[in-house]
Image: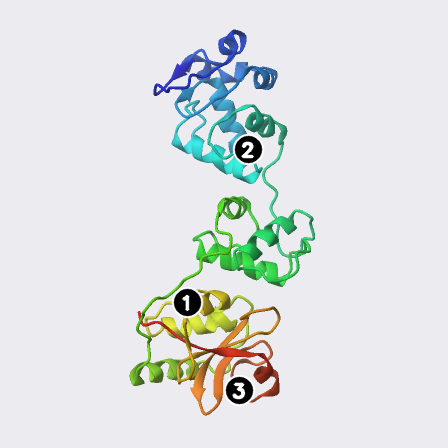
């Protein structure tokens, strides 16, 4: 056995397995001669393979991880940082102890999987989707039923999660998204708070916010939209304030957590409503004279009165935006 960097814990392996699998670089080059049977048998002989080890055994681990799209490095038989990171991703994905060490449990699971991580997309109805809906719900991205149906609400939640966490925005529960979700340790998502902040209220800013918002009147509603080609309610708010160089979170719940309570609503304040779920789920910008501008699913960007029976019944209150 060859170790790149000495470690306190030596690799414990039977003399037979060591002779087969860890004869140094020569076996890495001649890995094709070794059999899967040797690799499988080594499960019973091996106690731990970790960072710093080299040999055919490491090459086989790398190859298996590459088959599962979890490893993009060279299959060189060197257990480096990239291999360790990939092992941790595999362990998270399969609910194993996340230590980056290939022990018997991790190796058994790794060799039992014959296909890449399954990808889920819009329209799928699968039991496995429930676990991801549950995780997205815990992180304040998903508010629908935990039913395994990859419908519009799940699609929006996945896209928002990918966007916020710098993942490729595919709208699919692909391997990178699944791994990121399962490794996310937040229990209630990221809650932005403010303490003793100045609020972004002055005549010039109020005018800018309301003017920009009104210039977008008639823009169509689009689920997950955040550009003038189409908005959902929070995408509209985020866009308008971004145009005044004020960055807001993406979802209604996050905007609610970020902004500051006010007893008296003023022009440019945000007004929140409880619609399809408990808590804040819709938001608009107050224009004065009892009116607010928002994105309606039926009308797109529109102006509505707070005295409208539907909105009056669901009104939660007004909040001010912290000054950047």
Q: CA distance from mark 1 to mark 2?
A: 42 Å
Q: Quadrant of the C terminus?
A: bottom left
Q: Establish if 290 lies above or below 164.
A: below
Residue shown at the point (44%, 24%) measured from the top left: 50
Q: Position of residue 287 (x, y in %)?
A: 43, 86
Q: Position of residue 267 (x, y in %)?
A: 40, 85
The label on residue 213 is: none
Left or right, 219 with reference to 266 = right
Q: CA distance from mark 1 to mark 3?
A: 23 Å
Q: Nearer the viewer, mark 1 or mark 2?
A: 1
The label on residue 306 is: 3
Residue shown at the point (47%, 27%) measured from the top left: 101
Instruction: Assign a secondary structure to mark 1.
Output: helix
Q: Earlier in the sequence, mark 2 or mark 3?
A: 2
Q: Position of residue 276 (x, y in %)?
A: 62, 71
Q: Quadrant of residue 200?
A: bottom left
Q: Earlier in the sequence, mark 1 or mark 2?
A: 2
Instruction: Assign a secondary structure to mark 3.
Output: loop
Mark 1 = which residue? Answer: 258
Q: Position of residue 196 (x, y in %)?
A: 32, 69
Q: Establish if 299 lies above or below 238.
A: below
Near mark 2 (Cα within 10 A), the count class, few <14, some 14-19 or many ≥20, is: some
The label on residue 67 is: 2
Residue 73 seen in the figure: no
Q: Quadrant of the N terminus?
A: top left
Near mark 3 (Cα within 10 A), the count class, few <14, some 14-19 or many ≥20, is: some
């Amino acid at each position: 056995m060859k170790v790149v960097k000495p470690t306190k814990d030596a690799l414990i392996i039977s003399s037979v397995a060591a002779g087969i699998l860890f004869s140094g670089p020569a076996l890495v080059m001649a890995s094709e001669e070794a059999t899967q049977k040797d690799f499988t048998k080594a499960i019973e002989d091996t106690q731990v393979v970790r960072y710093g080890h080299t040999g055919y055994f490491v090459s086989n681990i790398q190859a298996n991880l590459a088959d599962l799209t979890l490893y993009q490095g060279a299959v060189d038989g060197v257990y480096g940082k990239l291999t360790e990171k990939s092992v941790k991703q595999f362990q998270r994905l399969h609910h194993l102890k996340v230590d980056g060490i290939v022990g018997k449990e991790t190796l058994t699971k790794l060799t039992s999987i014959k296909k890449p991580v399954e990808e889920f997309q819009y329209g799928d109805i699968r039991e496995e989707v429930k676990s991801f809906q549950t995780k997205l719900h815990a992180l304040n991205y998903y508010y629908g039923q935990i039913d395994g149906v990859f419908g519009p609400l799940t699609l929006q939640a996945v896209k928002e999660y990918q966007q916020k966490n710098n993942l490729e925005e595919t709208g699919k529960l692909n391997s990178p998204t699944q791994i990121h979700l399962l490794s996310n340790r937040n229990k209630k998502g990221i809650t932005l708070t403010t303490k003793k902040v100045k609020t972004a209220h002055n005549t010039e800013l109020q005018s800018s916010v309301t003017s920009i918002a009104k210039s977008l009147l008639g823009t169509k509603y689009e689920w997950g939209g955040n550009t003038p080609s189409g908005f959902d309610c929070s995408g509209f708010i985020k866009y308008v304030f971004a145009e005044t160089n004020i960055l807001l979170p993406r979802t209604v719940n996050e905007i609610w957590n970020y902004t500051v309570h006010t007893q008296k609503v003023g022009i440019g304040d945000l007004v929140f409503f409880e619609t399809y779920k408990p808590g804040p789920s819709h938001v608009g910008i107050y224009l004065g004279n009892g009116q607010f501008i928002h994105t309606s699913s039926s009308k797109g960007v529109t102006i509505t009165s707070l005295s409208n029976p539907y909105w009056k019944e669901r009104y939660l209150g007004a909040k001010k935006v912290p000054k950047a």
